[in-house]
Image (cartoon, rainbow, N blue to C red):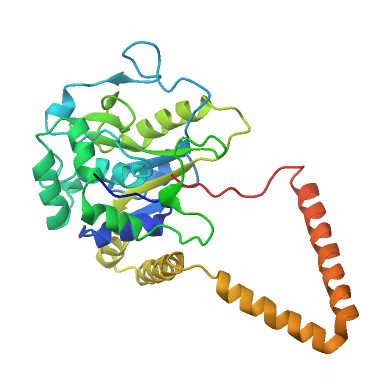
Amino acid sequence: MSGSWNTIESDAGVFTYLLTNLGVRNVQFEELLTLDPSSLAELHPVYGVIFLFKYPTDAPYRATGDKPLDGTFDHSIAENNLFFAAQTIPNACGTQALLSVLLNKTSGSDDEETKIDIGPVLKDFRDFTIDLPPEFRGEALSNSDVIRDTHNSFAKSSPFVDETTRNPNDETEDAFHFIAYTPFNGTLYELDGLQPAPISHGPCTQESFPEKVMEVIQRRIARYGDAEIRFNLLAMTRDLRIRARELGDVELLEREEQKRRDWQFENALRKHNFVGFAGEVLKGVVEYRLKEGGEEGYKSWVGQGKQKMVKRIEERRKGRGGGGGDIEMEG
């Protein structure tokens, strides 16, 4: 039986170093802030994209019968060297989406430019599972200690929530889901472990991928109401530092190196919680206030803090037209 998989964030730094720690070379992720195909094309070569969206618990996830809401199921391609795995365990969809792109860009890929060195760990995993049916591939992924441990190493530390005991069927929180899109053998495929098969979205070359995939994603987003804005799109690309070195672009290289340093720092912070530290700081501040102004000074300080907080909340509501704050998305 497999161990637990924890929730990870949809973050370029998390996904880049997750793959790096699995032994993948010269691959990184870039967050896309627009659905303009040119924003994706300028990252060439692009291996695929990872899309995060709210899982529709109040609407059908597929059309009636053996048909998806968009595109067509291709049951035969999963038996012909395309890696597709059924999702068999909660919280694994992020890593599963990454592998859905990655394991279809190996040395056996038909496009030399988009071949990826996936490293010995993932090569062994692909070689072991490629001849299995999708549901068995999903079970193999769920039971891979090395992939699960690497995935869990990027989970946020929380002193209040134990992800291993959270009920995945709890409807009190919105559920989010990762899927992948990638061109394979001249066709654009949607790879979603909650679907029974890969979904074909028609002919697609490496050059036409940015335009084709953005059209598909826009149609998917259109199925939601105008108020739903919680989407996230990440592109899997070649390490941009390679391009910088090839072009002799010192400024780009330094930006990318700094980005890596920032990612490493942020990933290190995710492994720790700071409740104890914050508690000690708060105790020190309270002791200082009591020493300086006594109990009355302390009460006055607390009252001023409450007034400032109420004022900030009101200003925020006015500035956003009554809307809420930023929403962090996880899958």
Residue 19 against residue 37 in the figure, above or below: below
Location of the C terminus by quadrant is top left
- Whether residue 315 appears in this view of the structure is yes
Q: Is residue 280 left or right of residue 183?
A: right
Residue 155 in which image quadrant: bottom left
Q: In the rendering, at what x and y percent does residue 168 appear? A: 44, 39
**Residue closest to the far top:** 65
Which of these two is toward me, 258 or 175? 175
**Residue closest to the far bottom:** 291
Which of these two is toward me, 127 or 162? 162
Residue 120 against residue 112 in the figure, above or below: below
Location of the N terminus by quadrant is top left
Q: Residue at x 39, y 59 (%)?
A: 13
Q: Residue at x 19, y 37 (%)?
A: 137
Q: Is residue 112 left or right of residue 177?
A: left
Q: In the rendering, at what x and y percent does residue 121 appear? A: 15, 55
Q: In the rendering, at what x and y percent does residue 10 appear? A: 43, 50
Q: Residue at x 32, y 26 (%)?
A: 195
Residue 247 against residue 277 in the figure, above or below: above
Q: Is residue 155 left or right of residue 79?
A: right
Q: Residue at x 49, y 43 (%)?
A: 34
Residue 61 in which image quadrant: top left
Residue 120 in which image quadrant: bottom left
